[in-house]
Image (tube, rainbow, N blue to C red):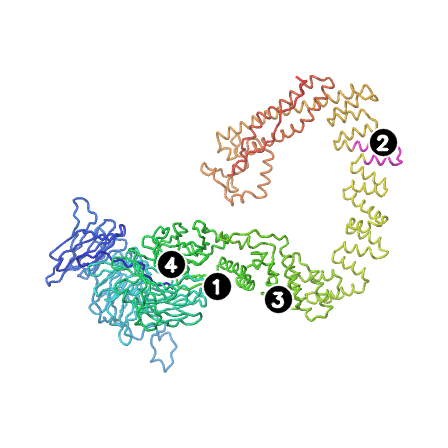
Amino acid sequence: MRNLIIQSHHAYPEISNAIQSIAFDTVNNTIYVACGLNDNNPGITVYRIHEDNVVEYLTEHDDPAYLKEDGSWDQICNMQFLGDSMSICISMKGGDIIMVKTEPAPGEPVVEVIGNVENGIIASCWSPDEQVLSILTGGNTILHMTKRFDVIAETTLSENDLSEFNKHISVGWGRSETQFRGKRVRAQLRDPTLPEQIDEGKLSDVDDGKVNMCWRGDGAYVAINRIEAGSRRAIRVYSREGVLDSISEPQDGHQSFLSWKPSGSVLASVQSSFGDANESKVIFFERNGLRHGEFSLGCPSNEKFTGLAWNNASSILAISTPQSIALWTTGNYHWYLKKTIPIASHASFCWHPERSQSLFVTNGSHVERIDLEFAYPTCKTAAPTDYGLTPVIDGSSLLVTPLYFANIPPPLSLCNLSLPFKIELVSLDPFSRSIYLSDNYKVHVYQYEPKRKPTFSYACDISEYTSELNVKRLLALESSKFIILADDRNNKTKICLFQSTGVKDESCMASLLNVTDLGKNFINVSYIEKLAKLFLQSENGEIFSLDINNFNVEKFHCDLPKACAWFTTVLIDDSVIPIGLTSSGRLYAEQRLLSTGVLSFYCTDRFLAFTTNKHILKFVHLQPFVDDMKVVEDDGVERHDERCRAVERGAKVVTMMPSKMAVVLQMPRGNLETIFPRIMVLNGVRKLIDVSDYSSAFKVCRTHRLDLNMLFDYDPEKFFLNVSSFVDQLGRVDYLDLFFASLKPEDVTQSMYMDTSKYKLSENQTTYENKVNTICKAVRDVLISKKDNKFFQSIITSYLCETPPNITEALNMISGLIESKSSSVDSVIEHMCFLVDINMLFDHALGLYDLKLALLIAQQSQKDPREYVPFLQNFQKQDILRRKFNIDCHLKRYEHGLTHLKEIEGAFEELKDYVVKHKLYRTALELYKYDKEKQQSILVIYANYLRENGKANEAAIAFESVGMISEAIEAYKSAGMWRECMSILQFSSTSDSKVEEIADNLANLCLEKRDYVDAAYIYLLYLSNVKEAIINMCKGTQYSEAIRLARTKEADPSLFKDVLLPAIGESFGEASEMVADFNSQIKAQTERILVLRAKKKEDPTGWAEGNLEDQTPDDLSLASTSVSTNRSLYTRYTQSTASTKMTRNTAKNNRRLEKKRARGKKGTVFEEEYLVNSLKRLISRVESMRAETYRLLEALMRCDMYTQASELQRGFSNVITILREKVVPILSVPMNTFETAIGEQPVAPEIPEIKPFEKLGILI
């Protein structure tokens, strides 16, 4: 659906001699022309034309043999620039091969005649890689030569090849031998695979008798089109080695023109039809010589053609006549005539070998370059006139399709305007109401109305103003104005502003309002109707603005980095942003490079959309400052970013329709696809919500399957302010039900539908804790206030969609409906069963104790009536309280059942059994809090339950509260609560012997638990055993209390010497032994850690491989598989992969690993980790003994054991000093563990803080 536009019509300076041939230096962007071979210049003169239009004389070569005996001049057969040798190879018809050095070395001749081909040269052509020269000689031979002119192959063209080389084979389908034959039709049988008339290869009356030669794009084959045996034309295909590959089948009217499509698929030629057809057409051949399609040129068979050539991108086929060059393109198997360029009768043309859209025309003594580009014929339109109108040029037909209403793939169209002239230019006005089209001489205007065929409005003549100009662009404006861009002979662009008269008379001239000439060549133009300004881009990227009201011209504040083949401008707030795409796929916004590898782009008032060569459609939010435009990365497709979307390979943007929220893409093969990107749909929904059009927003979300939470989450305050309007706009029950059913607590505007634009500042929105219930209640209140029965179902839905579903209220409403004997009960219940599980509904209805409602619900379910009817009848027979109790038991609502059971007279014993069975003790206590007797009865069974379940302390308190002393004593004993137990014994009338027995048991229980201080108090207070009290106080490190007991007046004086001192001495021995153990452990483990670290530093490979000190491998592999393979020097530092970890971390390996880690076997990778953890545990033990040691020091001093105290203080203080000075630095180093061996980073351990030991100052 693209049209072909002219971006530049460049005329190079005129040369004094007639140009015979042209060649291109693609390295230096220069053109070489060969002139002469006429009466004015008998030799060959070579000129070099630079890109800046400077013409440089290069050399001249003359040879008397160029003038033939008959008075005619020799001709140049082929001229090719060779980049490797920086020279030009010229092949002459007379047989000379001339090399012209473009950069000769000092003393090196510029011109060198390589040699002469005997019998002359009929045709010659260099391969695309400039490695092989193919020459057809006058002796019917074909020569293949290297670039050094060594002969590769010499093949004779024999006439026998036509009949003997290849015969085009028929597969035999349809032959009479394979068909069913009736007696009466046997004579009429013919082969249906054969044409009715077989071509004999008759020559056309306009055949020029020339020979043409061309190479395939990859340089593997060369084709020759010549007249064979004077009777017919044939195309011979030879391989690079000179081997004949195929000969084409005969075609009547086949002419001499030949061009191989660079992509290599087909060869193109021209055919003039005989008989009634009377048409000329382009025919295609495959490499094997068979026909492969055709298309009509729309001209008679006697039309004379002068040239045929593909551009190097295989996208344009140029066919020339003495009057014009026709440019044809194809799509969806249809050929379009896109442009007709008028030329002089003796002019010729050729394509640039690398710049696929540059066409060069040589006309006498000057060269012209026409730069072409494909562009979609759409314009930037805003709602509501964004019809996606696309007028496609096809010769004298204009194919018009409004993509908003019809997605019709080309070559079809919704409207086909057939005109009496060939259309060259087409444009749409800014509001898609008028279509302007021109043949470069007149402008015709057609009016367009939606869903109607465009109608002719008027025409105006512009030939008076453009006859001396090269018209290249037409741009329609508002108010019947239009712009013509045309290049003059000085390569400057004139901007002509016309005002059409509106008269249907085609001879009426248009009014020329202004002609602006800035002295530059402009290749692109864009128009912003709000500013009434044109923005023009020059060939070097400069941008100028032209006000069409006062014709003021201003230089734009910034330029594009380079010339862009596609260009537009967008107005964001008050800022104009120029956006351009180069032919190499670089997308710019002002000076900023947005993306590379871009295939196409399109702009709306909010978005810039473009497709990339990675098959992604991207959106960019347009901002007043280009630095704020964020382009999402390609991984946005995987992250489901709304600004990214995967599309088909090679897709291009045709147009965007904001009001339809759609983008139309065209695929490489030509078909169209309309998509609705989420970013555009969401933007449309946001706009609708902003204007409180909830009905349209709902329908858009429903159509495009967007989450309906968007209607609330985008603007909650607006929603609550417009709840009544929301209900009125939706109106339908099914719409409201769908809205309720879609509600969820998640804020979709902060998750899946987050606004990725920074253009709109996000406001702080109120957060709703229970969003779903709040919305349901707000809408439900409006529905209830309307008092319309049609919304009853929606009200029910609002209850059921709450979180959790408010089934009870919904069922209560249905109960009221049943009482009113409404006919819609069954339908409402059926609707409820659709929203909620039927079994849950039945249970809730039963929980309301409404058996009639439960029966109605059961009837809608799959339940068996033989089961639920007797089940409900059984409840119906019972009295009300017993029925409620049994229903609660059935529904396992035991607390409710307990409440009903309490109200039944004479059921207290049953209630107690019910409480024990369902463990409802606390509920029962609450029910009987005003009935002291029954509450205590329940408390007793609760206490028994607590005692049996390991809560003896609570059971003892309960027993004590109800006066069950013996049970309370046993419970306190079980709980180890000796104080509470002894207090009860003292309060009760228990005998002294019993008290002593219980006290002795409690003391032994405390000793078992190592609660020495509690045992000491029991011995002291209740057993009067001061000796045991002193001993246990010392064991509990309460030395001060032990000394106090030994020195009381009532105590035996011998206790101090015989009991206290030995006990303190025993504690001193244990402490001294512990200090010695600390010192030995610290010394051994710190020295071993230092040794291990030194060995790992010397031989890290051995440690990583898990070898022991005796070089015996440990039974542990750090390799990536279960095989015990050691890592090499190059792989031991690499990270392990996920699959490696999965292989290693099996349950069996983990158990084995943990056992080895806990064992810390000497010499393994776990030893250092084991030693470090051991030192950590040692620090914790030392810290826990700090207070005990200090109390022991005080006791030793008070008992006149000065020597022992000094020794203990020195030993313990020394342990802490060693820990602070030696152990902590060792532990502070990041430790190499098993994890670090497999590639993880080492982590420094956490070391507890160790404070200095507070010594007794009186000790030395």
Mark earlier in primary sequence (4, 2): 4
Query: What whole-number distance in Å separates the C-alpha atoms at marks 3 and 4?
Result: 52 Å
Q: Separation of disc 1 and disc 3 at Cα?
A: 27 Å
Question: What's the mark number on residue 733?
Answer: 3
- Judge whether residue 153 can be spotted in this image: no
Residue 988 is inside the magenta segment: yes
Q: Residue at x 60, y 56 (%)?
A: 744
Residue 311 higher or lower than 200, as above or below: above
Provide the residue designation for mark 2: 996
Judge left or right: residue 828 versus residue 662: right
Q: Which picture quadrant has residue 428?
A: bottom left
Determine whether 260 is above or below 1076 in the image: below
Q: Which mark is residue 426?
A: none
The x, y position of residue 429, in whole percent, is: 39, 65
Q: Which structural element holds mark 2?
A: helix
Residue type indicated by callout 4: Lys
Disc 4 + disc 2, Cβ < 8 Å = no
- Disc 1 vs disc 4: which is toward the camera? 4
Which residue reaches farthest bottom? 184
Q: Tag 4 or tag 3, which sits nearer the N-term?
A: 4
Which span is picked out in magenta?
980-1004
Residue to which mark 1 is pinned: 660
Mark 2 packing: few (<14 Cα in 10 Å), some, or many (20+)?
A: some
Is any atom of residue 202 visible in this view?
yes
Image position of 1246 with respect to 863: above or below: above
Q: For mark 4, what is the residue? A: 533
Q: Mark 1 to mark 4: distance in Å?
A: 28 Å
The amino acid pointed to by label 3 is: Val
Give the secondary structure at mark 1.
Answer: loop
In the displayed structure image, the side of residue 944 where residue 150 appears, left or right: left
Report the residue at 81% width, 30% height from top: 1018
